[in-house]
Amino acid sequence: MPLPIENVDTDQIIPARFLKATTREGFGDNLFADWRYNKDGSPKTDFVLNNPTYSGQVLVAGKNFGSGSSREHAAWAIGGYGFKVVVSSFFADIFRNNALNNGILPVVVSEKFLSELFAAVRQNPEATVTVNLETQTISNNETGESESFEINPYKKECLLQGLDDIDFLLSNKDKIDEYEKNRPFVY
């Protein structure tokens, strides 16, 4: 899904008026609400999320995605809509961490590669990308071009196993118990 807009901040991703809830449910319905809907609630036909030509679990966004406030709700909205991956040439640090903590993979690519992805979608609205977390590569399936991307090894393992931080700790309970049992006692 192409969103060739730069400097998308968290208030554009999920406007502040929707932040009253404390659970993740329903945030996907309000993803990019001010861009998606008219004041009367009807869909804006010219916004990409309302265009039936586009679909998928990968959001390809312009440079500097997720800036602004540290609201975790932005990651909730992206995940709630169904995106598993967001591709950009730059992410705000807090957004990147919130995305990873909520099972969404932020993939940083070069500006050249990002431009090529947008060009491929303009030429063929059904263009696809392949993101391989294990090999840390992203491929433009229209051109065959690929790039590598970086990810924290711990977060990579959590995403591959479908674990959040608490699940990861619980999956290592036996190791933690063994360590605690055998460590020297210090006053």
Image: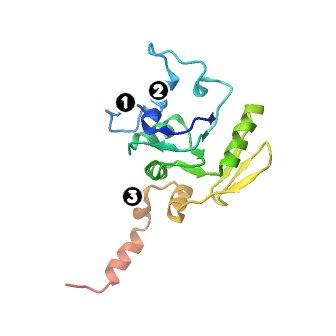
> The N terminus appears in which quarter of the rendering?
top right
> What is the distance, in whole Å, between disc 2 and disc 3 at their CAs?
31 Å
Residue 148 lies left or right of residue 67; in this view the side is right
User: Circle 2 sits on which residue?
Assistant: 33
Q: Residue at 51% of width from left, 25% of height from top?
A: 35
- Residue 183 shows in the view: yes
Estimate the x, y position of residue 98 in percent, counting from the top left.
Answer: 44, 49
Q: Could you say which quadrant of the image residue 2 lies in?
A: top right
Q: Residues within 10 Å of mark 3 (few under 14, many from 20)?
A: few
Against 139, residue 49 (above or below) is above
Q: Earlier in the sequence, mark 1 or mark 3?
A: 1
Distance from the alpha carbon under mark 1 to that under mark 3: 27 Å
The location of residue 125, given as percent across then percent down, is 73, 31
Q: Earlier in the sequence, mark 1 or mark 2?
A: 1
> Could you say which is closer to the camera, residue 25 or residue 85?
85
Q: Which residue is mark 1?
A: 18
Label disc, if present, on residue 179 of the rendered structure: none
State the SS at label 2: helix
Question: Which numbered mark, 1 or 3, is in the foreground of this view?
Answer: 1
* Residue under the point 58% across and 28% down: 49
Q: Residue at x 49, y 51 (%)?
A: 96
Q: List x then y, in percent, for residue 64.
A: 53, 44
Looking at the rendered structure, the kind of residue marked 3 is Ile
Nearest to N terminus: mark 2 or mark 3: 2
Q: Amino acid at mark 2?
A: Ala
State the SS at label 3: helix
Q: Kindly identify which residue carries mark 3.
A: 166
Asked if the residue at tag 3 contacts the one at tag 2, i.e. Cβ–Cβ closer than 8 Å, the answer is: no
Q: Is residue 182 left or right of residue 127?
A: left
Image coordinates of residue 20 in percent, x first then y, are 31, 32
